[in-house]
């Protein structure tokens, strides 16, 4: 990652002068390229406002808010904000220590709307209050949940019986604003088990006739506290958990996590592993878009496209299975490379796929793109302006469909993406149709990247020979004492990641997939925070619905591509 | 160093043909008809498989149900070192070790019990990666149904290889 201060074109002193009374806090460039600032909570709002509004800083995208627990410190908790500027490209990390007896900080909701759910999550998981937040309720766990699971003193093994039924009934449900023109007010519940939600999530809408006048979403049905599990398992054992984040493109999550840990270790995967990762990540992105578009079209009544898209998807899954041994949850990436080399017919199978897939994309293109029924149902529906999308923390294809050409494969290239020729499709209308067009074109661009990558697939090993990180080859474990000792040490003690913290972001299928990893030098992560792209996207959903019809709500939901595994973690 | 270009995929204003509705629909019909005819004339290009009569061919890396391999004399190769249990992300393996009366210089222990909870297992293959004795490998067998939760906890008798290893439907094993 590049040096953010240099990118911002200023020195540290110049940076601090931008803040009123800036000499009272510390700022430096962290090893992951972020400008890291330690701010007292009394100054937080000023600092965040300056970061957002100062023309030299212009941090318009709030990436993530999370809490970190350090029981041994005087100020036990730390609230961590990750920000970036789309225009300038620099990235900031703001840390705010808070004491246990009064764990509260002012809310950032007034500065970035994206803070809404991220603050609720930090409250739910870590018990940090955000003063001034309009709706600070639990988000991932049930209302009746006791305690805050990501605190270090919370025992994850405890069990109790939930005696209350599902309670989320928003206050406005009982309001019935009826007059002689509006007399058909009713409440409708979509989900959590509904064919159009594609995952367990619940939407409560208030209807006036068929028009939605108010909506609220409830998530957390698929919550398994993956972040807590990671704290008790070794670094490599987290990879199967990451498969279950965005399970439509499992490879991307594992690779994103592995890149994060590798950057902290200072280890790089061998060139062959990098290219294989890139090829499979692009195939996964293609599959993810295929599922999104296919399912979106099914919801709109166009079933055939689903089959046309699922056919290449099956073939890609077979390729993944031949490499990794699993179709959906591949668990193929390892810290330092890949679990094993690709099968000998990998190149020919990839080329075969490259020949067949475009036909299916073209078929859907011809069936749908100029179909007037489809256009009438999606054009002007679910419009998100560029400014609003950024304010909500959108990234990925949804943001690009609103006219912001932000793609991490170009902004912060990883896996050598800067060595490939590809285009970043954008559209400006920001409606469901634009999101469809962007995804369709991204599928073609993914194929273009794979085409170049397969031509330059180098030979050599697929995992590093640094046995502090990667298991030695089995043949040596069976025959050599030294390798056997490495093997034992790695399994029992785990990888020793040096103490420190890093935020690594990759371009997941839905947008910026970030892993904020804190290591304390032991064999497992001290804290692992995932920045799931569709969490930020979905928080805007209920606000987009007002004034739309119920059928439009389904069209919008499908076009956003909400994956519950990633949303609820 | 190449920089990706931003291309605009702005929706075009619907032309007369697509506004007329029928031509675009006919274009779409041509696509579905082509698929229909191809399928009708036997050039099957649908991905659907008539499971269970018809089955997909899986690779020899498929991660299915585990096998505990044996030595030539029929005893388990497992030396109860707890490596698989330690490396398991799902915490689904429970081993109880005992001293092996037939111990040699190569090993001292054997498992008194070796249980895998197949309902907890996520079939990631980490146990196979961890095993230093090639005592635990995976088969391609992935169709498992249980009527009770207890039935899903399988022990040595269920997991032990039956007959020569070549006769098992071998899946994920160490390759390097």
Image (spheres, rainbow, N blue to C red):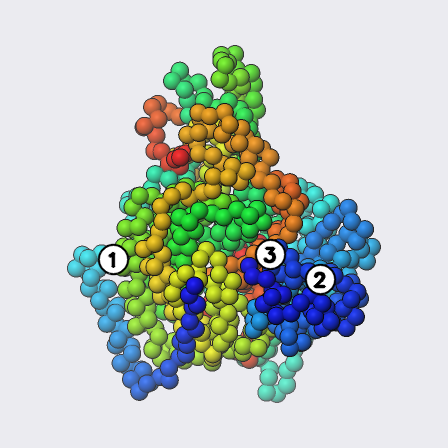
Q: Chain of mark 1?
A: B
Q: Please name whichever residue, A274 or A110, is drawn nearer the observer in this view of the structure.
A: A274
- The residue that appears at 40% across and 35% down in the rendered structure is B176
- The residue that appears at 45% across and 42% down in the rendered structure is A463
Residue A545, compared with residue A343, is above or below; it is below
- Where does the C terminus of chain A fall, quadrant-wise? bottom right
Q: Which residue is mark 3?
A: A32
Q: Tell which circle, 3 or 2, labels the residue nearer the N-terminal end.
A: 2
Q: Tell me the mark number nearer the camera, choosing from 2 and 1.
A: 2
Q: Chain of mark 2?
A: A
Is residue A422 shown left or right of residue A24?
Answer: left
| Residue A295 point in image, percent of width and height | 42, 64
Q: Point out the residue furthest to the left here.
A: B41
- The residue that appears at 35% across and 84% down in the rendered structure is B14
Q: Residues within 10 Å of mark 3 (few under 14, many from 20)?
A: some
- Give me the C-alpha separation between circle 3 and circle 1: 48 Å
Q: Which quarter of the figure has residue A285? A: bottom left
């Amino acid at each position: 990652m590049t040096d953010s201060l240099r990118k911002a074109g200023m020195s540290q002193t110049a940076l601090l002068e931008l803040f009123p009374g800036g000499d009272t806090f510390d700022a430096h460039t962290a090893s992951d390229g972020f400008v890291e600032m330690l701010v007292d909570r009394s100054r937080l709002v000023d600092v965040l406002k300056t970061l957002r509004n100062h023309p030299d800083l212009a941090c318009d995208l709030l990436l993530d808010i999370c809490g970190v627990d350090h029981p041994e410190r005087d100020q036990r908790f730390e609230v961590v904000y990750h920000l970036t500027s789309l225009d300038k490209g620099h990235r900031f990390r703001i840390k705010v220590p808070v004491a246990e007896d009064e764990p509260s900080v002012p809310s950032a909701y007034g500065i970035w709307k994206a803070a809404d759910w991220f603050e609720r999550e930090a409250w739910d998981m870590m018990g940090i209050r955000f003063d001034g937040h309009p709706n600070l309720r639990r988000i991932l766990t049930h209302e009746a949940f006791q305690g805050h699971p990501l605190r270090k003193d919370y025992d994850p093994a405890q069990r109790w019986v939930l005696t209350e039924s599902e309670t989320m009934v928003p206050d406005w449900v009982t309001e019935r604003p009826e007059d002689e023109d509006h007399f058909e007010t009713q409440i409708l519940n979509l989900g959590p088990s509904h064919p159009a939600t594609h995952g367990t999530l619940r939407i409560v809408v208030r209807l006036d006739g068929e028009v939605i006048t108010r909506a609220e979403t409830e998530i957390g049905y698929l919550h398994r506290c993956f972040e807590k599990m990671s704290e008790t398992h070794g670094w490599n054992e987290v990879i199967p958990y990451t498969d279950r984040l965005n399970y439509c493109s499992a490879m991307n999550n594992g690779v994103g996590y592995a890149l994060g840990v590798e950057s902290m270790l200072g280890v790089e995967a061998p060139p062959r592993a990098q290219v294989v990762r890139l090829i499979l990540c692009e195939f996964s992105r293609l599959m993810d878009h295929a599922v999104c578009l296919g399912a979106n079209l099914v919801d709109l009544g166009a079933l055939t496209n689903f089959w046309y898209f699922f056919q290449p998807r099956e073939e890609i899954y077979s390729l993944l299975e031949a490499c990794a041994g699993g179709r959906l949850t591949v668990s193929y990436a390892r810290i330092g490379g890949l679990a094993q080399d690709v099968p000998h017919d990998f190149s020919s199978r990839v080329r075969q796929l490259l020949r067949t897939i475009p036909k299916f994309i073209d078929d859907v293109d011809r069936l749908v793109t100029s179909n007037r029924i489809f256009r009438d149902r999606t054009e002007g529906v679910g419009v998100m302006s560029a400014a609003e999308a950024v304010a909500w923390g959108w990234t990925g294809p949804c943001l690009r469909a609103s006219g912001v050409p932000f793609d991490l494969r170009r902004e912060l290239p990883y896996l050598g993406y800067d060595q490939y020729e590809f285009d970043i499709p954008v559209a400006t209308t920001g409606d469901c149709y634009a999101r469809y067009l962007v995804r369709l074109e991204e599928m073609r661009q993914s194929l273009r990247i794979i085409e170049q990558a397969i031509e330059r697939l180098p030979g050599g090993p697929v995992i590093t020979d640094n046995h502090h990180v990667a298991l030695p080859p089995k043949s040596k474990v069976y025959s050599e004492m030294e390798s056997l000792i490495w093997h034992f040490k790695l399994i029992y003690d785990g990888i020793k990641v040096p103490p420190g913290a890093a935020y690594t972001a990759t371009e997941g299928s839905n947008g910026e997939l970030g892993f904020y990893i804190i290591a304390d030098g032991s064999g497992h992560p001290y804290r692992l925070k995932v920045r799931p792209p569709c969490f930020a996207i979905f928080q805007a959903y209920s606000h987009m619905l007002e004034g739309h019809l119920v059928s439009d709500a389904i069209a919008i939901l499908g076009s956003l591509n909400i994956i519950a595994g990633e949303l609820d973690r | 160093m190449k920089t990706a270009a931003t291309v605009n995929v702005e929706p075009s204003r619907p032309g007369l043909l697509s506004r007329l509705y029928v031509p675009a629909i006919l274009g779409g019909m041509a696509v579905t008809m082509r698929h229909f005819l191809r399928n009708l004339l036997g050039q099957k290009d649908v991905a659907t498989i008539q499971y269970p009569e018809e089955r997909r061919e899986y690779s020899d890396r498929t991660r299915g149900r585990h096998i505990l391999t044996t030595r030539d004399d029929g005893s388990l190769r497992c030396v109860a070192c707890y490596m698989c249990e330690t490396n398991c992300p799902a915490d689904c393996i429970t081993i109880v070790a005992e001293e092996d009366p037939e111990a040699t210089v190569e090993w001292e222990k054997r498992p008194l019990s070796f249980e895998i909870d197949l309902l907890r297992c996520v079939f990631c293959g980490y146990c196979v990666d961890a095993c230093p004795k090639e005592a635990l490998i995976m088969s391609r067998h992935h169709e498992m149904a249980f009527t009770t939760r207890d039935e899903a906890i399988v022990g040595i008798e269920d997991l032990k290889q039956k007959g020569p290893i070549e006769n098992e439907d071998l899946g994920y094993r160490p390759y390097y």
